[in-house]
Image (cartoon, helix red, strand yellow):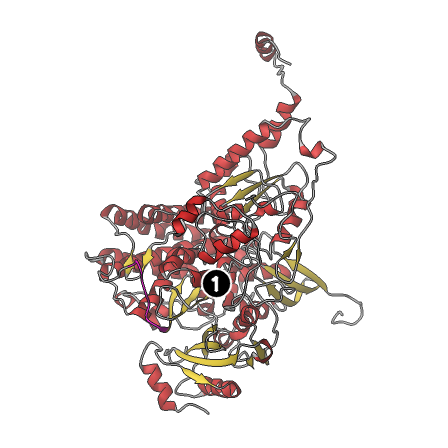
Amino acid sequence: MSATGIIQTQTLEVSLGPQHPITHGVFRMDVVLDGEYVVKLKPVMGYLHRNHEQLAEKMTWLGSMPYTDRLDYFCSMTNNWAYALAVEKMTGLKVPERAEYIRVIMAELTRLLNHSCAIGFLLSDCGAWFTPVLYALREREWILDFFETVSGARMMCNYMRFGGVRVDLDDASLAMARNIVARWPAFLDEFEKLMTENEVLLARTQRVGILSRNLAINASVSGPVARASGVEYDIRKVDKYGVYDRFDFGVPVGEAGDTFDRYMIRILEMREAVKILEQALRDIPAGPFIAPEAKLRNFKVPAGDGYGRIEAPKGELGFYLVSEGGAKPYRYHVRPPSFINLTILEDMCLGQKVADTVIILGSVDIVLGEVDR
Amino acid sequence: MIPPLEQVREMLSAGAAKSSLLVEREEAVAVAQFLKTDPQLQLDFCSCVTAVDYIKQDCIEVVYHLYSVALKHGPVALKVRAPRALEQCRMPSLTPVWRGCEYQEREAFDLYGVKFDGHPDLRRILMWDEFVDHPMRKDYVPPMDYEWEPTPHAETLARAKQTGGTVPASALEAKK
Amino acid sequence: MAVDPNLKSELQKQGIFVMPVEFLYNWSRKSSLWPIQFGLACCAIEMIAAAAARHDMARFGAEVFRASPRQADLMIVSGTVTKKMAPQVVRLYNQMPEPKYVIAMGACAISGGPFKDGYNVLKGVDRYIPVDIHIPGCPPRPEALLHALMTLQEKISKQHLNEVSWYDKNAPSEFPVPQYGAHDLEPPANPKVWEPPKK
């Protein structure tokens, strides 16, 4: 029914997905439209539910590590770290310093990779077709070359172990990493020159999809989406896991909570990640890369439960593990940031045009491997 | 019964949540409101909601991990239990207190069969609507749609033989 | 029918090219395969990387990923096909016009992959639709996808017009879509396309 009451209109129900160019995977949004404006939006997920949690109950503790790669399939290193952190919390394993620095280097490179691709895909949703993605993927290939040299695989690295990392970084790999970090500011400057002041981007993303600070906290939104709404919460600063308290970096926080803030936060976080990387690559000490007492065959975790979380590029990635003292987990639960960040998708999209729905979803930056597990 | 403030503050200062609050189903919402609004706790961020199936103790436990964005402390683990039998497996929903519990409680309903009273939209989230089972329960038997694979897990190997798939001799040798 | 090579080269010098219609038909199809924009999971990222600057699928004429199945002739099933998604995959396949091809990319699309032991995982997309090329890997490298594309091109160039399925009145072009059952998909597999291996 139209608001004016003069013309009788009907609402239109559209199913955006599960196969749709903009849904970043097999995700479906049931949208009810009044003309161009969204009246109701219900996300439907589960099209990639691969019962990772049930599989983990049948496998050993270490056997689940390759499966964590496939959660957020862009960022396999941070997924591995979150799981290793949760298990190390429960067993009390101490990680040697060199391994902690290596983990920070891998995690921050993953953050660079993820944010550049997220922005690239957001811009293709805005209509820039495929060009920003090509620039982002060009830089991503350098980081994937580094991951392949170190861990043997481009995407599914399976690199972290309980108590450290699987292989050490040698000098040639460190030189590769330094090269990537040296090139990155120039790439970001080029990217920003093309995009940040682009009037089409500004017109399409400013004041679109506003998320208020209180709703963000109440809806457990985390990561760049929450920080863009003014929530000053970065797990690297709050929990101080790993050796993050040794690095001098800032946490950008937005004000308006609209799509443009979510875009800008990711650019600023990439610059902060470059700062962390420069410091880590400069200060990395020599030493063992895995705890000597971590024996990985017949690895058992003492009975009890524990929750470990990290600041993954998409938000707070946590693992809740329950152990009965054996070689297999009793309960293994992943707290996925993308899944929970979707809670407020409807709130952000109500009253917006259907074309803006696409951009708002792109700015939330979801990955279906994580949403559905 | 609202837990004493000192006990909760002790949990927060201990760092990692080695202990947790176990509350009765009837008091869960009141305790949750207290934890969220008390000025010294201000646990306004519900980070993770997990359902665990304790088949030996005949209960399903839902664990809420809470943090505070305002005071930057946490976690506090809040646990609520319900009996396993499907008709009695209900507990009050904490979605009115923390909106972030919405999808995670729906997932607990879908995969474990726990019904949350007061949830705004309780329906299946990961499986399709016509599905009737609750697959993450420990006594769930998956459908027989397997053939074989070279290195299956033990119970999968047994089921694969039942469906009539071929099992190569080398796999049987490895099991011995 | 063979043409005398001398005659052929004489004609070429005059600007006249002699070839079977089949050659031209197959060459034009294999050089402009249009995949459908259909990424399911992790393999989709390698598919996008294959279309990006370093690996460049555009050299093969296949960089135009169509959003609509009506305009595509190649479906690269990249990622795990879950039972919830399986009816949608079959519907998309049915909507593609013939001649159409399917590449099963990655271990999950071939047989369920690492998630084979799953209540919601379809143990291979070839349970419902016929697959032409299988690419093993988890995920396969972009170069492997390009190799698969080249293998598909070779397969297309060997197809004979009098044997192809789309000109055969009895060969189906659409396959029945599975329905959501109470415990599993109904039917769990299409018996005309797939059978479990015998004892």
Residue lying furthest left in this view? Answer: A286
Q: Please give left or right for residue A324 compared with residue B125 in the image.
A: left
Q: Is residue A123 visible?
A: no
Seen at 56% across and 71% down, the residue is: B106
Q: Is residue A147 visible?
A: yes
Q: Quick one: B138 or A56, which is closer to the camera?
A: B138
Question: Is A297 within the magenta?
Answer: yes
The chain to which mark 1 is attached is: A
Q: Please give left or right for residue C198 compared with residue A69 in the image.
A: right
Q: Which residue is mark 1?
A: A54
Question: Is C136 within the magenta?
Answer: no
Quadrant of the frame with the N terminus of chain C: top right
Give the magenta-colored segment's residue range. A296-304
- SS under mark 1: helix
Quadrant of the frame with the C terminus of chain C: top right
Q: Name the amino acid, label 1.
A: Gln
**Location of residue C82 (image quadrant):** bottom right
Q: Position of residue C156 (x, y in %)?
A: 59, 30
Q: Quick one: B102 or B167, which is closer to the camera?
A: B167
Total marks drawn?
1
Q: Position of residue A276 (x, y in %)?
A: 30, 60
